[in-house]
């Protein structure tokens, strides 16, 4: 058979400018040229298994630009003539046609990594199993594979396109995981009249030979064929069950396919379990690129927690005039103590001033009142006595020796508190709860202020068993629960937590376990919100619909579907493209946090992932919608960003020892206290409840920290009293 034509596209700003050498593209070309695949799916003229070879017919290097990436891929994948019957490629130098296109580079977490965003809109069919196979295989080699956004799909119904990492090692590792099945994938794509001829089967037990083989189409079984074994392994799970392998089903990219029965749901999660640090990096990298525009507010609408979006510059001097700092008498300092005639009074806020004072004259003056012309100091009233009155007014006053003053004493000069043109609050500063920032804004002479508003977030609970405690009519005495039901504590808790962060919250309510209802509720909420936080429906149950609804109904992209942590393992984070929200008043992509249904799991995941994302969108680090480079470097959150978005301290662990979980790191709920230096560390922390089950709400009561405990090993089995641990601060710590 003719070689399969391949195109290799390298995406790199530096390589496209000649500032770096492309190593991944040539490495992929070399790997393909040295690979020959023998397949059982087709045979040559002699009836022997066919041998497939690859030929690289096109290579190119482009910068990290979505339009340029898409243009090249689209051109390579568009057939130039009807060659579907033969599989041959048009090798015209100017217009190559490829059956396989590999795009290497631009698949990381940086905002400049746009390869997946560029090619996914071109897909006429997604191939999530190929993408998952690449990730799963690479994860066996390195955990850093969890940080790559690989993708696979069909473009123009004619070519398979893969997006793989840009490093030489990552590119070849990922493609190498699926290289044995790619020839058959191309064969299947080219089979315009069905795939029966591609699937020889055997009714014998696995491993036994047969004299004759009969064809079978995908997922079908005839009366003459009982549970056939599909040798190419691309059949449906009911066909593959006969192989006797519990790992026969390849991951499909969704936990449950909408519309299929419970018997067809995946028995293993297709989502790799990513480390907590990688999950947070994925969240912040995605959220950092979501544009949240600053809002101009009148002072009365500015609230604590708002972040200044532009420097606030004083429009006038404060004070605008030389002002007395106390009640007393405006004087000419050089006159010194003695008896002086009183020339009137200067009162704060009074338009009637005092004419110019001459030497030997004084004037009464109130705190904050303008200093009369000619005067240069103020003597406080306690250092004076009245000598003469006239018509109820002071006529003459004696200044005692203790009232001797120097020029400028007890006077605030013009601009003493604030100079015109000075920066009152800098971009990025947060309006606090003490009141100082609001006061400074008030005296600045500005009428409106540019601030970043916390995002508007929808909150939804899901589950047929969940009783809505916030619904109208539920304010009275709670009635008896129906058997098998639970009261919804997740939504009230999350709404309170989001409001504490300054968010406007849209309460979606409780939605039943129905894909249509979930999709409708989420779509309506995302039309008016920057994102949504849901609880329930993210695990492996037959009614856990959140992930497939996000992928299949909302056109969302799941960034991760499981996290290596306890509790909160099923935590899911996804983004929904702006194009799926056409007509919405809010611009940009939306975020989706699908949290577990157990209340403690939901709250722990909230503080670990949602709260940092909200703070980032609120402007607490950099500018929302700007480059995330200052936040995430090489897949790791910068320490400066982490301290602002999810602060933590080192504390001494107090109380009974805790056995470490052997499977996952654990985050126990605890009380953080400042001891005032009794220990060199200063902080101590103890669990608020010894029972730390994810369903036990009491383990979150009075908690202000999550203690990060490492995964247990033979060498390290417990955390004992006196050890130092990391405490993630989730509320104000205690003192004393």
Image: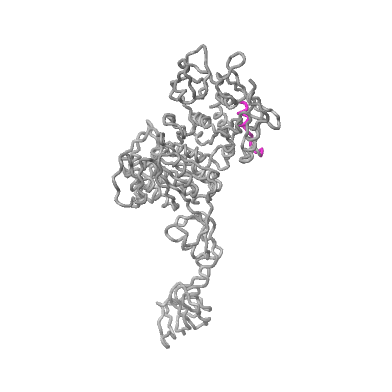
Does residue 453 appear anywhere in the picture? yes
370 is higher (above) or lower (below) than 239:
below
Q: How many marks?
A: 0
Q: Nearer the viewer, residue 162 or 715?
A: 162
Q: Position of residue 612 (x, y in %)?
A: 46, 46
In the rendered image, which quarter is residue 541 located in?
Answer: top left
> In the rendered view, does 598 fall on the left or right side of 214?
left
Residue at screen point 41% across, 34% down:
540
Q: Nearer the viewer, residue 336 or 684?
A: 684
Q: Position of residue 637 (x, y in %)?
A: 49, 43
Residue at screen point 63% across, 41% down:
67
Which residue sits furthest bottom? 391
Q: Quadrant of the N terminus?
A: top right
Which residue sits furthest top? 211
681 is higher (above) or lower (below) than 451:
above
> In the rendered view, does 377 fall on the left or right side of 596?
right
Q: Position of residue 128 (x, y in %)?
A: 52, 32
Q: Nearer the viewer, residue 391 or 171?
A: 171
Does residue 558 appear anywhere in the picture? no
Q: Position of residue 675 (x, y in %)?
A: 34, 50
Find out whether residue 22 is within the magenta segment.
yes
Write down the region rendered in magenta: 17-30
Residue at screen point 55% across, 24% down:
181
């Amino acid at each position: 058979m003719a070689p399969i034509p391949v195109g290799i596209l390298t995406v790199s700003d530096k390589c496209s400018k000649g500032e770096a050498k492309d190593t991944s593209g040539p490495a992929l070309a070399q790997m393909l040229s040295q690979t020959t695949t023998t397949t059982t799916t087709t045979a040559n003229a002699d009836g022997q298994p066919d041998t497939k070879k690859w030929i690289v017919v096109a290579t190119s290097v482009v910068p990290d630009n979505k339009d340029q990436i898409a243009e090249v891929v689209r051109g390579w994948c568009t057939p130039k003539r009807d060659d579907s019957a033969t599989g041959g490629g048009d090798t015209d130098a100017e217009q190559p046609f490829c059956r396989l296109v590999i795009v290497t580079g631009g698949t990381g977490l940086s905002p400049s990594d746009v390869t997946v965003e560029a090619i996914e809109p071109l897909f006429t069919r997604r191939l999530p199993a190929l993408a998952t196979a690449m990730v799963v295989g690479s994860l066996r080699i390195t955990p850093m594979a969890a940080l790559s956004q690989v993708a696979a799909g069909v473009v123009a119904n004619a070519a398979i396109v893969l997006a793989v990492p840009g490093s030489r090692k990552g590119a070849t590792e990922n493609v190498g995981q699926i290289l044995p099945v790619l020839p058959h994938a191309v064969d299947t794509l080219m089979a315009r009249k069905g795939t029966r001829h591609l699937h020889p089967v055997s009714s014998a037990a696995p491993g036994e030979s047969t004299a004759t083989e009969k064809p079978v189409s995908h997922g079908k079984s005839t009366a003459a064929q009982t549970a056939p074994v599909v040798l190419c392994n691309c059949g449906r799970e009911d066909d593959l069950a006969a192989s006797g392998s519990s790992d026969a089903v390849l991951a499909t990219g969704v936990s449950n396919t909408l519309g299929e029965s419970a018997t067809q749901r995946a028995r293993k999660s297709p989502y790799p379990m990513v480390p907590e640090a990688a999950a947070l990096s994925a969240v912040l990298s995605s959220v950092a690129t979501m544009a949240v525009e600053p809002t101009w507010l009148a002072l009365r609408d500015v609230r604590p927690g708002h972040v200044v979006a532009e420097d606030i510059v004083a429009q006038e001097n404060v004070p605008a005039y030389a002002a007395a700092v106390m009640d007393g008498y405006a004087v000419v300092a050089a006159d010194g103590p003695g008896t002086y005639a009183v020339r009137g009074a200067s009162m704060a806020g009074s338009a009637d001033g005092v004419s110019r004072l001459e030497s030997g004259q004084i004037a009464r003056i109130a705190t904050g009142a303008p200093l009369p012309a000619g005067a240069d100091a103020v003597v406080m009233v306690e250092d004076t006595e009245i000598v003469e009155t006239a018509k109820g007014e002071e006529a003459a006053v004696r200044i005692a020796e203790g009232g001797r003053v120097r020029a400028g004493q007890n006077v605030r000069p013009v601009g003493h508190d604030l100079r015109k043109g000075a920066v009152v609050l800098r971009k990025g500063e947060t309006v606090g709860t003490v009141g100082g920032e609001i006061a400074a804004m008030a005296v600045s002479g500005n009428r409106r202020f540019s601030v970043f508003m916390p995002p508007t977030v929808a909150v939804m609970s899901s589950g047929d068993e969940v009783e809505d405690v916030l619904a109208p009519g539920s304010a009275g005495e709670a009635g008896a629960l129906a058997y098998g039901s639970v009261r919804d504590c997740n939504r009230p808790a999350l709404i309170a937590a989001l409001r504490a962060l300054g968010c406007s919250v849209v309460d979606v309510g409780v939605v039943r376990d129905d894909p249509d209802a979930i999709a409708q509720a989420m779509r309506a909420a995302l039309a008016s919100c920057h994102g949504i936080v849901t609880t329930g429906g993210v695990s492996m149950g037959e009614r856990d619909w959140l992930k497939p609804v996000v992928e299949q109904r909302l056109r969302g992209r799941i960034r991760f579907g499981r996290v290596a942590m306890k509790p909160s393992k099923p935590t899911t984070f996804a983004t929904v493209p702006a194009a799926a929200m056409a007509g919405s008043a809010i611009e940009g992509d939306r975020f989706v946090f699908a949290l577990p249904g157990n209340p403690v799991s939901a709250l722990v995941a909230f503080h670990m992932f949602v709260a940092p994302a909200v703070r980032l969108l609120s402007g607490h680090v950099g500018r929302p919608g700007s480059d995330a480079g200052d936040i995430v470097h090489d897949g790791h959150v910068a320490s400066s960003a982490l301290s602002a978005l999810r602060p933590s301290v080192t504390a001494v662990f107090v109380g009974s020892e805790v056995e470490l979980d052997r499977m996952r790191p654990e985050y126990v709920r605890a009380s953080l206290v400042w001891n005032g230096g009794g220990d060199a560390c200063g902080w101590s922390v103890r669990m608020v409840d010894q029972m730390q089950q994810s369903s036990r709400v009491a383990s979150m009561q009075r908690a202000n920290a999550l203690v990060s405990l490492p995964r247990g090993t033979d060498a390290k089995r417990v955390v004992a009293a006196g050890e130092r641990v990391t405490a993630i601060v989730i509320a104000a710590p205690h003192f004393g």
